[in-house]
Amino acid sequence: DKLVTELKYQPSEIYAHCNRIIEQVNAVCSSFASAEAMERAAKEKKGHASYENIEMMMFTPEMGNVAFASAYDTWGFTLLDAAEFYSERLQVKKSILMRTLWGEYYYSKQKRTPMRKLTKNTSKELMAIEFLFNPICDVYGLEELKSKDTLEQYITDFNIKVP
């Protein structure tokens, strides 16, 4: 919410910001994992460190271990939540959406499928921007405009529970 309401970020800026945070957290986790692996190798008197479980320590939206949330407005979701929500609407398998709602994927309405490349038949925006961050920005924009009818339609369409 702060990215939209206070910093006035656009959906593409929110995506880039979230991506940077995830990369920074993963860099810190990786350095801890590397140090731990080297320490373990030294104790076991091995000549090399084993990095087998580093992927388990990484955060990626596709693994479902990253949540996007607002503590102030008490909402949040993971990519699993978004994949479940959009699966029926887009007629795309949830497992495919879990892999494609984040990263360099575009949605083709004509083919009803995520695509790796931007073409004349795909949306111009990444799927994360189109399906995750545009709706969030739209809802906050409607709230600011006090557009009650459209806001109520969003609440219904997105199955938002208002306390």
Image: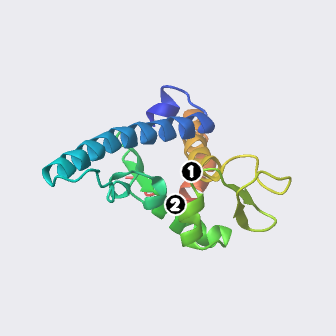
Q: How is the image coloured?
A: rainbow
Q: Is residue 2 above or below residue 161?
A: above
- Give the mark count: 2
Quadrant occupied by the N terminus: top left
Q: Are marks 1 and 2 in contact (CB under 8 Å)?
A: yes
Residue in front for this viewpoint, 153 or 74: 74
Residue 154: tell me if it is visible: yes
Depth check: give the residue in front, 61 or 51.
Answer: 51
On the image, numbered disc 1 is attached to which residue?
A: 132
* Other-residue count near label 2 (Cα within 10 Å), few / some / many at <14 / 14–19 / ≥20: some
Residue 19 in the image: x percent, y percent?
A: 50, 41
Above/below status of 63 relative to 6 = below
Residue 90 image point, x, y percent: 67, 68
Residue 138 sits in quarter = top right
- Residue ID for mark 2: 82
The quadrant in which residue 87 appears is bottom right
In the image, what residue type sits under mark 1? Leu
For marks 1 and 2 on the same chain, the one whose residue lies earlier in the sequence? 2
* Identity, as a three-letter code, of the amino acid under mark 2: Ala
- Element on which disc 1 rests: helix
Identified at 58% across, 40% down, the residue is 137
Whether residue 143 is visible to the viewer of this picture, yes or no, is no
Residue closer to the observer: 13 or 149: 13
Please provide percent x and percent y for residue 101. Answer: 58, 57
As helix, strand or loop, the secondary structure at mark 2 comes to helix
Q: Who's the residue at 33% across and 38% down the image?
A: 28
Displayed quadrant of residue 15: top right
Residue at the top extreme, as displayed: 7
